[in-house]
């Protein structure tokens, strides 16, 4: 085995700025965890872009290799549950935050972070889902746990062209739900229709800043990836006994709302934490994503870039211009 591997490394300069470069990194600098994995594919998430731009709330120490998602092949293992040659997935936990992540050709991680690759899905397809797909799947699982069925009415998805939003629209459509997609990108109407959205509405329709405690009920459930005023509006527009699953804070981390949707309509607000999702549920949802929840037109949702092309994609997501999913190939 080579002693070095190719990685996107983020470094802090003497003047406090950060720079990214693709270069060789020593395997010996990886942490001493149980399993060494040769990464074949990763994917780009907003948290990766924050880490790659020096956000100390995500990554405390630099130099660092971001990448909260990784799919690859076990190279070495001190845990008998995993053998050399096993195909595996690692997402979330501390990967890519303070543990060297999937934007390098090797990772060494605790064995308790690892999901065996399910049948009916390959390594590349697993990274089309990645953390974004798992996050969307947890939200949809919560809708179903609270008995929200397709016949109960539409599901609204905010931030619908982003990673989690795209996955939510696609999976919900696959499961027979009517999806209302919310976006600020007017030029992406065709994309959203192609992945299954029945209706597309501008984000202004779900940014009500009035003091009305309740608004006209429009949907039986929601996957909110934005937060802030949009989440408050969605809650006030949810039908009686509806469920709102939330995972984002791009519009703000504060939520200013009132109790009436909860005590007069019985609305449930459910948070999504994919980072520390229990392994039992994680495996269950990965098996669903590989089978009955797997969208039919995966090629419409994603594009592939190399490690050398990743810098441009990071800038795109930071500018709020990413559409769909970006898979990162580390095979070269």
Image (cartoon, rainbow, N blue to C red):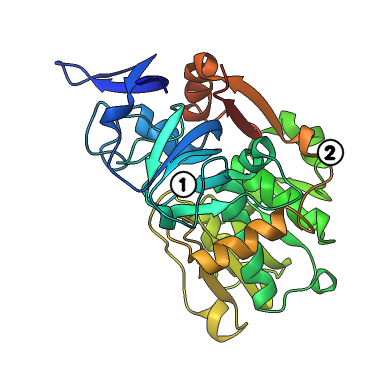
Q: CA distance from mark 1 to mark 2?
A: 26 Å
Residue projecting furthest to the left: 14
Q: Position of residue 268 (x, y in %)?
A: 57, 76
Q: Residue at x 77, y 51 (%)?
A: 294
- Residue topped by disc 1: 251
Q: Earlier in the sequence, mark 1 or mark 2?
A: 2
Element on which disc 1 rests: loop
Q: Is residue 31 visible?
A: yes
Give the number of the disc on residue 108: none
Q: Quadrant of the N terminus?
A: top left
Please identify the quarter of the rendering in which residue 99 is found: top left
Q: Position of residue 216 (x, y in %)?
A: 69, 69
* Nearer-the-camera pick, 258 or 142: 142
Which of the two marks, 1 or 2, is nearer to us in this view? 2
Q: Residue at x 23, y 29 (%)?
A: 62
Q: Position of residue 255 (x, y in %)?
A: 42, 61
Q: Residue at x 81, y 60 (%)?
A: 175
- Residue topped by disc 2: 194
Residue projecting furthest to the bottom: 263
Q: Residue at x 73, y 28 (%)?
A: 187
Q: Position of residue 155 (x, y in %)?
A: 73, 61
Left or right: 233 in relation to 102: right
Q: How many C-alpha atoms fall within 10 Å of the one at disc 2: few (<14), some, or many (≥20)?
A: some
Element on which disc 2 rests: helix
Please identify the quarter of the rendering in which residue 192 is found: top right
* Nearer-the-camera pick, 175 or 63: 63
Q: Is residue 159 visible?
A: no
Q: How many C-alpha atoms fall within 10 Å of the one at disc 1: few (<14), some, or many (≥20)?
A: some
């Amino acid at each position: 085995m080579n002693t070095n591997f190719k990685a996107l490394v983020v470094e802090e300069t003497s003047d406090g700025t950060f720079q990214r470069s693709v270069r060789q990194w020593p395997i010996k600098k990886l942490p001493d965890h149980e399993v060494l994995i040769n990464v074949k594919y990763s994917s780009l998430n907003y948290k990766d872009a924050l880490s790659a731009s020096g956000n100390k709330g995500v990554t405390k120490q630099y130099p660092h290799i971001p990448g909260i998602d990784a799919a690859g092949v076990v190279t070495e293992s001190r845990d008998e549950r995993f053998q050399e040659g096993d195909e595996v997935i690692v997402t979330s936990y501390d990967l890519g935050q303070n543990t060297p992540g999937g934007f390098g050709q090797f990772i060494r991680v605790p064995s308790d972070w690892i999901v065996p690759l399910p049948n009916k899905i390959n390594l590349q397809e697993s990274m089309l889902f990645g953390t974004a797909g798992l996050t969307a799947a947890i939200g949809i699982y919560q809708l179903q746990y609270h008995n929200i069925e397709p016949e109960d009415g539409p599901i609204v998805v905010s931030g619908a062209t982003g990673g989690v939003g795209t996955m939510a629209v696609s999976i919900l459509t696959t499961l027979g739900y009517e999806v209302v997609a919310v976006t600020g990108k007017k030029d992406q109407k065709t994309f959203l229709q192609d992945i299954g959205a029945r209706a597309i509405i501008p984000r202004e329709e779900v940014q009500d800043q009035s003091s009305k405690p309740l608004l006209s009920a429009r949907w039986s459930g929601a996957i909110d990836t934005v937060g802030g005023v949009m989440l408050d509006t969605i809650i006030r527009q949810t039908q009686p006994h509806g469920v709102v699953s939330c995972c984002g804070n791009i519009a703000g981390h504060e939520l200013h709302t009132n109790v009436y949707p909860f005590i007069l309509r019985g609305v449930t607000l459910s948070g999504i934490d994919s980072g520390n999702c229990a392994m039992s549920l994680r495996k269950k949802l990965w098996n669903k994503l590989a089978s009955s929840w797997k969208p039919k037109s995966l090629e419409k949702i994603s594009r592939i870039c190399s490690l050398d092309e990743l810098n441009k994609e990071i800038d795109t997501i930071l500018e709020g211009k990413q559409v769909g999913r970006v898979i990162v190939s580390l095979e070269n």
